[in-house]
Image: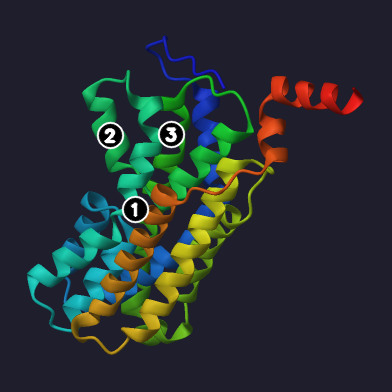
Amino acid sequence: MLLRQNKSNLDSNEIMLGAKATFPLIVGAIPFGILFGTLAAPSGLSVAATIAMSVFVFAGSAQFISLGLLAAGAPLEVIVATTFVVNLRHALYAANLVPHVRKLSQKWRIAIGFGLTDETFAAVTSRMVEGDIKDFRSLYLGSWLAMYGNWILCTIIGILLGELIPDMTQWGLDFAMVVTFIGMVAPHLIPRKNAHAQMISASACWIAVLVAAVVSVLAADMPNKLGLMAAALAGLTSGMLFVRFYKPAASSKSIAADNPDLKANNQGANNG
């Protein structure tokens, strides 16, 4: 894959491609954003604070967790610690993007960091796997602006609908959040190619998902919803430890497949 970023101007085609790649995930995020707007007032946030949270925080999972903890009367330090642990996954996202942002200016890197969401990361990395990217900045900007505008707009819609339809929180829109995250995680559970690195990545994802699921059930009764923080931390840690320490025993066939010279020598010996 070749990244051509020498031009100072942004590529409008890449911006559109970034937005287009993000559109399927935006559809799933729409009820997610509306639900946040409807839940904010019952949780004690004013209209201004709710909109400001979507504008300046721009982190759906962290915002929802904050609402739940605020409603439960959790202290500030618990809210900060929980959202920090849940958002640790963004450190892994950022590490994956380092090769593409290393030569960008500090302003661009700050902007990319602010715009980093699960949906944008999924859309951009999918485009990187599929083919050549003319300008990473433009592709990322298109995805980011699409998600950012959608999130703010849906928050406002949720606030308005929450005032008009008080019982809207009983519609089960929170299930959209679950479906959206499943849609982003599921492709990573199946390696696209029979490659060693992708097999390890898929295995790590499975381990993280299973560990987080088990811990979330076992820690469901913890106060202040600390079980959520425990599950996120356990899943993240288990996946990282697997990638760090897993060293499979390579068979002679796999070694020969990766080493053409060794494979040729083996064939010569068999023919002899």
User: What mark, if any, has residue 89 been given in the picture?
Assistant: 1
First of labels 1, 3 by sequence position: 1
Contact, CB < 8 Å: mark 3 with mark 2? no
Instruction: Name the front one of labels 2 and 1.
Output: 1
Say which residue label 3 marks.
140
Please rate how many residues cluster around mark 2, counting C-alpha atoms within 10 Å: few if below 14, some from 14 to 19, many from 20: few
Q: Position of residue 86 (x, y in %)?
A: 29, 62
Q: Residue type at mark 2: give it.
A: Ala
Residue 30's place in the image compared with 188, above or below, is below
Q: Nearer the viewer, residue 180 or 34?
A: 180
Task: Count the labels in the image.
Answer: 3
Residue 34's place in the image compared with 257, above or below, is below
Q: Nearer the viewer, residue 18 or 265?
A: 265
Question: Where's the N terminus, which quadrant?
Answer: top right
Please rate how many residues cluster around mark 1, counting C-alpha atoms within 10 Å: few if below 14, some from 14 to 19, many from 20: some
Q: Position of residue 2 (x, y in %)?
A: 54, 18
Say which residue label 2 marks.
111
Q: CA distance from mark 3 to mark 2?
A: 10 Å
Looking at the image, residue 45 sits to the left or right of residue 27; the answer is left
Contact, CB < 8 Å: mark 1 with mark 3? no
At horizontal 25% and vertical 51% (from top left) the residue drawn is: 55
Please rate how many residues cluster around mark 3, counting C-alpha atoms within 10 Å: few if below 14, some from 14 to 19, many from 20: many
Q: Position of residue 187 (x, y in %)?
A: 60, 54
Q: Nearer the viewer, residue 237 or 260?
A: 260
Q: How is the image coloured?
A: rainbow
Q: CA distance from mark 2 to mark 1?
A: 18 Å
At horizontal 38% and vertical 72% (from top left) the residue drawn is: 35
User: What mark, if any, has residue 120 been given in the picture?
Assistant: none
At horizontal 52% and vertical 45% (from top left) the residue drawn is: 22
